[in-house]
C-alpha cells in the first residue's frame, strides 16, 4: 500500500496471533488504514495477548483466561482470519461456526488446508477465501496469493484483496495454483535467506570476517533487489549487463549453469507442493 493511500475495512477478528497474523496486523495499524469496529485477536496465552495491550485499535483475548475468547472475537465480525496451525483448524471451525453471522468472510492463512475443508466445516452463509502470504508482509513488501471459495462473492474477494494490499502485493489465482504460489512466494524468502547464508559462508571461507561478509552479501542482495524494482527490467537483462564477455562473472555463471539450478528449484518447489497436499489430506474431513 502506498504511503498516501487510504483504506477502510470492517471489523476483523484474528484467531491466532502468530508471526503471520502479526505481519498483517502491522499493515492494518499503519496510517491511512481504518478498521471500523476495531480489530480483535485471540491466542492461547495471556502473555501473548499482553503484547498487544498498547494498541488501542486491538482487543487482544487469551483462551487460557477466557475459554469463550474465540467466540467473543468472531461475534459480529465481518472478516475472520484463521491463522492457527493447520492441525488446529477443524476443531476451531467447529467451535466458532454457530457464532458466525450471515455474510461473514473467513480468510484462511493455514497452509495446505483446502477451501473444501473450510466450507464443509462452516455454515452455508459464510464465504471463504484461502490466502498464502509471505513473511516480507512484516515490512510491507509481502506477496499474497488468494483463492476464492464457491460461496465467495466479488465483494468478498475485493475485501480480502484490500486486506492483504495493506502489507504488499496480491495475486488472485484458482485454488489449484495456490500450493504452487506457496512453493514460490510463500517459501521463497527462506530460499533467498538460504542463498545469503551460503554466500556468506563462502565469503568467510575466503578470509573475510563474518561482519565483512555480511556487509558484502546482505548489501549486494538488497541493492540488486532495489535495482530490479527501480529499473523495471527482466532479471535476465540485468544479469547480462553485469556479465562482461569473457570476464570473471561470466566464468562464475557458467559454473552455476552447470549445476542446473533451474532443475534444482523445480525439484525443491515440487517437494513443497507435495508437502502442502499431504497437509491438506491430513486435515480433510473424514467421510463416514
Image (tube, rainbow, N blue to C red):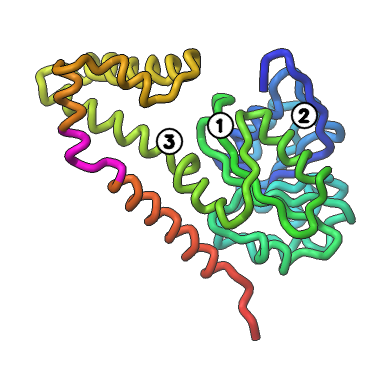
| Quadrant including the N terminus | top right
In terms of secondary structure, where does tag 2 sit?
loop
Q: CA distance from mark 2 to mark 1?
A: 22 Å
Image coords of residue 165 (percent x, y): 67, 31
Q: CA distance from mark 3 to mark 2?
A: 30 Å
Most foreground residue, 12 or 3? 3
What label sits on residue 189 in the rendered view? Answer: 3
Q: Quadrant of residue 53?
A: top right
Q: Vertical placement of 246 versus 279: above or below? A: above
| Residue at 36% over, 19% down | 238
Residue under label 1, please give it. 142
Most foreground residue, 139 or 2? 2
Residue under label 2, please give it. 57
Q: Is residue 200 visible?
A: yes
Image coords of residue 17 (percent x, y): 62, 42
User: How busy is the neighbourhood of tag 2: few (under 14 within 10 Å), some, or many (20 plus)?
Assistant: some
Image coords of residue 111 (percent x, y): 54, 53
Q: CA distance from mark 3 to mark 1?
A: 10 Å
Q: Are marks 2 and 1 in contact (CB under 8 Å)?
A: no
Q: Is residue 268 left or right of residue 53?
A: left
Q: Which residues are magenta?
A: 255-262
Amino acid at each position: 500500500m502506498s504511503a498516501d493511500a487510504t483504506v477502510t475495512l470492517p471489523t476483523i477478528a484474528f484467531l491466532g496471533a502468530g508471526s503471520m497474523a502479526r505481519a498483517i496486523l502491522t499493515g492494518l495499524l499503519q496510517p491511512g488504514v481504518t478498521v471500523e469496529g476495531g480489530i480483535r485477536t485471540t491466542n492461547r496465552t495471556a502473555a501473548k495477548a499482553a503484547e498487544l495491550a498498547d494498541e488501542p485499535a486491538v482487543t487482544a483475548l487469551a483462551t487460557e483466561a477466557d475459554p469463550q475468547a474465540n467466540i467473543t472475537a468472531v461475534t459480529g465480525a465481518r472478516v475472520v482470519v484463521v491463522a492457527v496451525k493447520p492441525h488446529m483448524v477443524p476443531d476451531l471451525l467447529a467451535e466458532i461456526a454457530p457464532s458466525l453471522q450471515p455474510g461473514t468472510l473467513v480468510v484462511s492463512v493455514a497452509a495446505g488446508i483446502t477451501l473444501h475443508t473450510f466450507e464443509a466445516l462452516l455454515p452455508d452463509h459464510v464465504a471463504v477465501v484461502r490466502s498464502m502470504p509471505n513473511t516480507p508482509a512484516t515490512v510491507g513488501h509481502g506477496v499474497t496469493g488468494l483463492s476464492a471459495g464457491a460461496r465467495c462473492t466479488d465483494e468478498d474477494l475485493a475485501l480480502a484483496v484490500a486486506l492483504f494490499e495493506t502489507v504488499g502485493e496480491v495475486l488472485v489465482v484458482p485454488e489449484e495454483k495456490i500450493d504452487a504460489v506457496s512453493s514460490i512466494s510463500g517459501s521463497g524468502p527462506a530460499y533467498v535467506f538460504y542463498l545469503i547464508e551460503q554466500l556468506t559462508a563462502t565469503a568467510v571461507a575466503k578470509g573475510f570476517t563474518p561482519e565483512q561478509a555480511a556487509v558484502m552479501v546482505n548489501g549486494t542482495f538488497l541493492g540488486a533487489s532495489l535495482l530490479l524494482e527501480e529499473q523495471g527490467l527482466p532479471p535476465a537483462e540485468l544479469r547480462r549487463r553485469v556479465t562482461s564477455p569473457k570476464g570473471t562473472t561470466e566464468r562464475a555463471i557458467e559454473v552455476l549453469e552447470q549445476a542446473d539450478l533451474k532443475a534444482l528449484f523445480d525439484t525443491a518447489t515440487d517437494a513443497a507442493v507435495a508437502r502442502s497436499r499431504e497437509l491438506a489430506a491430513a486435515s480433510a474431513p473424514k467421510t463416514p
